[in-house]
Amino acid sequence: MIPMEYYLTVSTLMFFIGVFGFISRKNLLAVLISIELILNSVEINFSIFNRYLYPDHMEGMFFSLFGIAISAAESAVAIAVIINIYRTTQNIDVRQINKMKN
Amino acid sequence: MGTQIAFYTLAAIIVVSSILAVTAKKMMRAATYLLFVLIATAGLYLLLEYEFLFAVQLTVYAGGILVLFIFAILLTSANSDRAEPGDRKKIVSGLVTALAGVVITTLVTVKHKFLYAPPVVTPENEITMEKIGHALMGTGRFQYVFAFEILSILLLTCAIGGILIARKR
Amino acid sequence: MAFTLFILLIPLCVFLLLALSGKRLSAGVTGVIGTLGMAVVAGLSCFSAYRYFFVIGQSGGNFPALVPFSFEWLRFTDTLSIDLGILLDPISVMMLTVISTVSLTVHLYSVGYMRGEQGFQRYCAFLSLFTFSMLGLVMATNIFQMYVFWELVGLSSYLLIGFYYTKPAAVAASKKAFIVTRFADLGFLIGILLLSYCTGTFDFGELTANNGLLVIGSTTGMAFLGLSAASWALALIFIGGAGKSAMFPLHVWLPDAMEGPTPVSALIHAATMVVAGVFLVARMFPVYYFAAHDVLMLIGYVGAFTALFAAVVAVTQTDIKRVLAYSTISQIAYMMTALGVSGFSGPDGLGYTSSMFHLFTHAFFKALLFLGAGAVIRAVHSNEMSRMGGLRKHLPVTHVAFLVACLAIAGIPPLSGFFSKDQILDAAFHHDKVLFVALWLVAGLTAFYMFRLYYNIFWGKERTYEHKPREASWTMLVPLGILVVLTAVTGFFPFSKFISSDDMGYAAGINRGVAASGVAVALIGILAARMLYRKENDRPAQLAARMGGFYRAAVEKFYIDEVWMFVTKKVIINCVARPLAWFDRHVIDGVLVDGTGRLTEKIAGSIKGMQSGQVQYYALVFIAGALAVAVWAIYI
C-alpha cells in the first residue's frame, strides 16, 4: 500500500511548479499551461482524499469530474481570447499586452 | 509491489514533465510535456481505482484540451515559438515562492496525522457506471443533477463565447 | 361630533387645490373657492359650538372634553406616543368659532383688498394653510401635536409676512418673525421634552387630570437651581408661548410683521396666531396653577409689564399699523396677566374666564380695526398718520366701523371690550393690587392712543389728496359690517357659564366699582386725545418736548431692537458664532473632512504603484499572502 502522503507530495510539487510557471513565464500560452497544472493537481487531491478518507462516498470524485469540465471550458475561452489578442497585436507576451492600461 | 513500482514511475514522470513543461523554451515541447503530465495523472487515477475519472482525464484533457493547445500554438507560433529568456527577477521570486510553498505544504502534510485504513475496494463501495449515472441524474442528497445542468450551461456559454471572441470581424 | 374632522380637512384641501393649480385659476375663481371653503368651515364651527355648548353641555351640567377622532402616529415607549386627533372642550370650540369667523371675513375682505395684486392665488393658498394650521393647533389633543401645528402657523406667518418678497423690508421682517419665534420655540420644545420625560405622556387630558396630579407626582424631588422640574418645564413652555404672543422681550418681531398685507395682519398678527401663547397657557392652566404657581405669577408680571410697555410705545408711533401692532401686544399681555392672576374653580377662576373672554372679543374688534385701517390705507396709499386727516367725509362707512372698534377696545359700554376688560380688571383687583393699577393705567393709555389714531385719521387737519379717497368696494365693507355686529353683541354672551377653569360654568356679574373706574380712566384717555388731536394744534408737539428723553425713548421703542441687535450681532456673533465657525472650518472641515480626504489621497498615492496591471505580480503577492496566512494560522 502506498501512503496517502506520497500522493499528496506529488500533487503539491505539481501545484507549486504550476505556480512557478504562472509567475515566471511570459508567453500567455505557457501561463495557461501552468494553470492547467495547478488545476490538475487540485483534482488529484480531491480524488486522493475521497479514496483514503471517505472510501464509501463519491463526492471527491465528482468534484474532480466537474473540475475537469470547468477547466475545459476555461481553457476554451482563454485560448479564444489569446487568439484574438494575437490577431490584433501579433504578440502574446504578457508584458507587452498593456494597451488597455491607463 | 507492482503498484509501488507503478506509483514511483508515475510520480517521477509527473514531477519531471511538470518542470519541463513550465521551463521549455519551445511551446510545442511544453505542450508535449503537459501531455505526459496529464497521462501520468490519468495513471494515478487508475491506481486509485477511479476508472471513470481515468477515462475522462484521458478524453477531455489529453484528447480535447491539449488538441486546443496545439492548435493555438500553431496559430500563434510565428514569432513567439522561441520565447526570449524570462525576467530574472520574476524567475527568482517565483522560485522562492514556489519553494516556500512546497516546504510549508509538505510540512503540514507530514505533521498532520491522517487517520485512515488502507483503502479496499469491495463490491459495496465499488464505483460502477450505474452509481455514477444515478448520482449525476438524481436530485437527492449526494446527487448532482443541478450541478450537472449548470455545468452544461457553462460549457454552452463558453462554446458560444469562444466562437464570438475568436471569430474574424 | 366626528364631522369636526372636516373643519380641519376643508382648509387643507383648499390649500392643496390652490397651491397646486397656482396661476391656472383666475384670481376671481381663487377668491370664490377660498371664501366658500372658509364659509363652510365657519358654518361647521358654529354648528359644532352650538352642539357642544347647548346639546352636549346642557345634558351633564359641565363641559366634558371630547375626543371624536384620534390615531396613534408615533410610538416611543409603552406609555409615550404621539397621537394625532381632535380635542373638543370649551376653549377649543370657542377658538374654532373665532378663527373660522375672522378667517372668513378676512378671506372675503382680501378679495377686494388684494384686487390686482400679483400672486393672489399664492396669497389665498397661504391663507388657507394658515387657517388649517391654526385650527389644528387649537384642536390638538396633545402637546406634541400642538407643537407641530405651532410650527406650521409660524411657517405660514413667515410666508405671508414675506408676501411682497420684492420688498427688502418685508423679507427682513419675515425673517425676523421666523427667527424670533423659532428661538422661543426652542424653549417650548425643551419644555415639552422635559415634561414628557417626567410624566411619560404628551396628552393634555392626562396632564391636566386631577388638578395636574401626574405632573406634581412625577416631578417631586427633581429640582434645578432652586426651581422644581415642573416649574422649569412650564416656564420653558411659557417661553414658547411668549414668543408667539409677543411678550416682552420677545415682542420685537410683531411690529415689523406689519410689512405683510393688512388682512394678514388682521388675521394672523391680531386675531388668531398671536393669541396662541395665551391659548397654550390656558390649555395647560390646571398644570400651571397646581404644579408651578411661581411660573403663573411670573406670567402675570411679565404680562402686566408688557401691557404697560407696549401701550406707552403705541402712544408715540406714527405708522397706523404699528400703533395697532403695539396695541395688539398690549392687549395680548392683558390676557396673559388675566391668566396670571386667575384662581381655580368657580368664581375664583374669573381671570381664566376673562382672559378667554377678552381673547374672544379682542379677536373681533382688533380684526375690525385692522380691516378698517386697511380700507384707509387703500384709500390714501400710505401708512403714515401725517398723510391722513379729515377722512370721515370721504370714508363714512369705514369711519363708523373704526369708531365702534375704538370704543370697544377702549372699554366703553355696551360694546364687547367693556365686558371682557372689566372682568380682567376685576380679577386683578382681587388678586394683586399692583397688577390692577398697571392694568388700569393701560386701560387709560389704550383709550388715549386709540383715539389719537382715530382723530388723526378721521378728524385733524383737512387735507387735499392727489386722488380723492374713495370708499372701499362691498367685498371689503361686508366683512366690516359683520365684525361691527360681532363687536357690538359678543359682550352680552354669558361667557362664564360656558368657559371656566374647571369646565363647570358659573355666573359672573359686573363689579360696579371696578367697572366705573375702568370706564372713567378710558373716558379721561378719550378726552385727552380729543383735546390734543381733534383739531390740528401744536399742543402734542409741546407735550412731547416737555417729556424730552422719555418721549424719544418711547418713539424708538425703548431701544429693545437695538439691544437685540447688540446681543445678536456683537455678543452672539463674536462670542459664539465666530468661534463655532472657526471650529467648523478648521477642525470639522479642516481636520476631519478634508483630513480624511487628504489622508486617503496620501495613502493611495503611496500604494498605487502596486497596482501595476501585471497579473503575474498579483498572483505572486496573492500566493505569498496565502502562504503567510497559512503559516500564521498553523504556527502562531
Image (spheres, coloured by chain):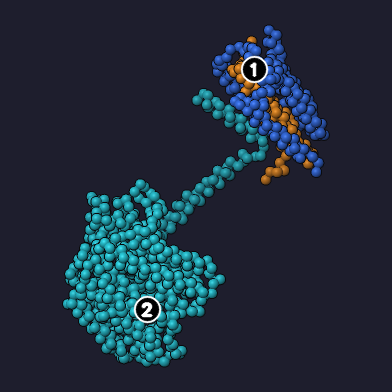
Quadrant in which residue C627 is drawn:
top right
Q: Nearer the viewer, residue C5 or C302?
A: C5
Residue found at the very far top of the displayed protein:
B1
Residue position marked by numbered label 1 in the rendering: A7
Is residue A69 shown to the viewer in this render?
yes
| Identity of the residue drawn at 27% across and 67% down | C498
Q: Quadrant of residue B145?
A: top right
| Left or right of residue C196: residue C519 | left
Chain C drawing hue: cyan
List x then y, in percent, for residue A70: 69, 30
Which of the two marks, 1 or 2, is nearer to us in this view?
A: 2
Instruction: Report the disc number at residue C482.
Output: 2
Please tell me whether mark 1 sits on a helix, a strand or a loop. helix
Residue at 61 percent across and 30 percent down: it is C623
- The chain drawn in blue is B
Q: Is residue A39 left or right of residue C466?
A: right
Q: Could you say which disc has been placed on residue C332 in the image?
A: none
The hue of chain A in the figure is: orange
Query: Which one is in front, B157 or B130?
Result: B130
Residue C305 visible somewhere in the drawing: no
Label 2 crowd (10 A; few <14 / some 14-19 / many >=20): some
Mark 1: amino acid: Tyr
- Kindly identify the residue that appears in the image at 76 percent across and 32 percent down: B84
> What whole-number distance in Å separates the C-alpha atoms at marks 1 and 2?
108 Å
Q: Quadrant of residue B100?
A: top right
Q: Amino acid at mark 2?
A: Ile
